[in-house]
Image (spheres, rainbow, N blue to C red):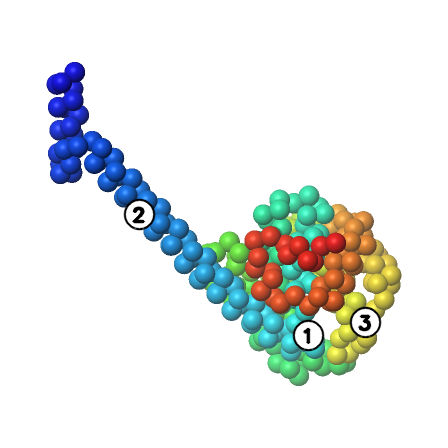
Amino acid sequence: MHANTVESDSAYAPLGLADPAMAQAQLERVTADFGRMYRERNEALRALARAHHEALLRLSVAAEFRDDDTGIHIVRMGFLAEALALAMGQNPAWARLLRMAAPMHDVGKIGVPDAVLKKPGPLTTEERTVMNRHAEMGAEILGASDVPLFRLASEVALSHHERWDGQGYPRGVSGTAIPLSGRIVAVVDYFDALTMDRCYRPAIADDTALAMLERERGRLFDPAVADAFLAHADGMMALRDRINERRPQFSALLEDESPTHLHA
């Protein structure tokens, strides 16, 4: 037994610790230090990621203010996209990520001239080409990052103007070749854009907008996504109305959980 103790003690000699208790205490301190460093690093990385996300959201707000009179549209986009994803049974973590990504769907509009973006009448062929470039511009702005959030946001920016029948832009893909994120955001954006005042027309009534959405299922929109929105229309509109009433800041989109004050 004595020989084993000597042999055990000698294992700590390279550490300069002849006492196993001292060695254990030192290892515990080292472990604690590593844990503290890990937490501080993660906190710093989260703070940096939040700062980057807020910067891009501010860019999205800037683009949105050029297209309508309020940036609340991008807040609604985030929470409505999350709600629709959850209604379709998607993973809550992915739905939260979509909530953060969806508001950046039209960030590429920052590169569209006001003469085109705010034109009250129909666009010419050339103007439509310029306008349609915003999807690819947004994808390029967001796609420079390897962060999952921005990769999803880039996917949304590129795909939310595609159509189920393949007649959309910029790539003309159809059906399930369109990412689910883009198919969800397309439905939410359509309904929200119809029911808000625009520079070229007043808001369309909810019932009329829902009827228009139903007519476009299978043509503009994935039937399953459109049906999910229609089946949960009362809840979606109630969430929209609470957002309009309480006017949450766009920083609310960055919370780990949906703010409870937005839910009945």
Other residues around mark 3 within 10 Å, as few (<14) / some (14–19) / many (≥20) = some
Q: Earlier in the sequence, mark 1 or mark 3?
A: 1
> What count of labels does the image hold?
3
Tell me the distance, in whole angstroms, between the alpha carbons under discs 1 and 2.
Answer: 48 Å
Residue of label 3 = 203
Amino acid carrying mark 3 in the image: Ala
The spot of residue 241 in percent (x, y) is 77, 63
Left or right of 8: which side holds 180? Answer: right
Amino acid carrying mark 1 in the image: Thr
Q: Secondary structure at mark 2?
A: helix
Q: Can you say which quadrant of the picture contains the C terminus? A: bottom right
Look at the numbered discs 1 and 3 and tell me whether their residues touch, using CB distance below 8 Å: no
- Res 159 seen here: no
Q: Earlier in the sequence, mark 1 or mark 2?
A: 2
Q: Secondary structure at mark 1?
A: loop
Tell me the distance, in whole angstroms, between the alpha carbons under discs 1 and 3.
Answer: 14 Å
